[in-house]
Amino acid sequence: MESVHYYYDSTFDGFLSVVFYAFERNQQVQKIEKEGAGVQDLFSETVAVPTETAKAERVWKGLVKKTSAKNARLVQLAFMSELTDVEMLLWRYLRKVFTSQHPDFYQNMLDEDVYNLMQTARKVTKEAHRFQGFVRFQQTADNIFFAPIDPEHDILPLLIQHFKSRYADQQWVIYDTRRKYGIYYDLKEVSEVQIENPEADLQTGQLNEDVKDKREDDYVALWQRYYNSVNIASRENKKQMTRLMPRRYWKYLPEKNRE
């Protein structure tokens, strides 16, 4: 069986297309990487697999049938982690699921790949849940609320329903400064956006003076006063604080930007 190094376009459908391609040709997968992610492999065949939605859908439906819709969702969540070699973890897991004679294999937590899949998906959902409370909007002069975030995982899609429900009467943008794309709510629908020349300093998260609402600085001051009023110095517990709100989430919080 020949060994192959695969490349794909970084999308979930692209990854599932690789899975279909490898199974169809009965090939030994040496590596799966996003296009442009690494150096060409000199010791195995390299193949750039095009994304084919129909084939990706067949893999997805097969996974749901073999396991469950809930379990298939875990695979998608783990993919969103963007952790190093997550594609190979998912490939090993899917190969085992599709070839196992045991219908409940996907629940076997004694298997290393099953366990790691579950843990990886849990990390993604945990971070998405935390960001529901760690997003801080700034109001622009044209009444759009803008919030930069810098999550470890690609969690923007997981935030849509929460913020769409919570801020249904406001136009807003949540922008992932690490991946350079955002989600925009126009009072009706949420769409993905890319901002080529953002009117904000993406290091500090602050809107430029000429685009922010004139009251925005007052709102920031209110956040900081509120934080200072509830943070009793004599009872401050830095260890507990960083456990509940790790420092990696502080980057764009106005109440923490002076620490």
Image (cartoon, rainbow, N blue to C red):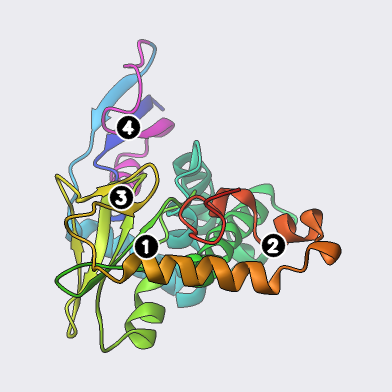
Q: Give the range drawn in magenta.
A: 14-42
- Which residue lies under the disc numbered 1? 156
Q: Residue furthest top?
A: 42
In what element is the residue under mark 1? helix
Q: How crowded is the residue under tag 4: few (<14 C-alpha within 10 Å), some, or many (20+)?
A: many
Q: What residue type is labelled 3?
A: Phe
**Numbered label attached to residue 20:** 3
How many angstroms separate mark 2 from mark 1 (CA)?
A: 30 Å
The residue where tag 4 is placed is 6
N-terminal label among 1 and 3: 3
Mark 4 residue element: strand
Label 1 vs 4, first from the N-terminus: 4
Mark 3 vs 2: CB contact within 8 A: no
**Cα–Cα gap, marks 1 and 3:** 27 Å
Q: Which of marks 3 and 4 is in front?
A: 4
Image mark for residue 108: 2
**Element class at badge 2:** loop
Q: Where is residue 78 in the image (x, y as percent from the top left)?
A: 50, 55
N-term mark: 2 or 1: 2
Residue occupying image coordinates x 30% and y 71%: 215
- Do the CB atoms of the residues marked 2 and 1 lie less than 8 Å apart? no
Q: How far apart are marks 3 and 4 (CA)?
A: 12 Å
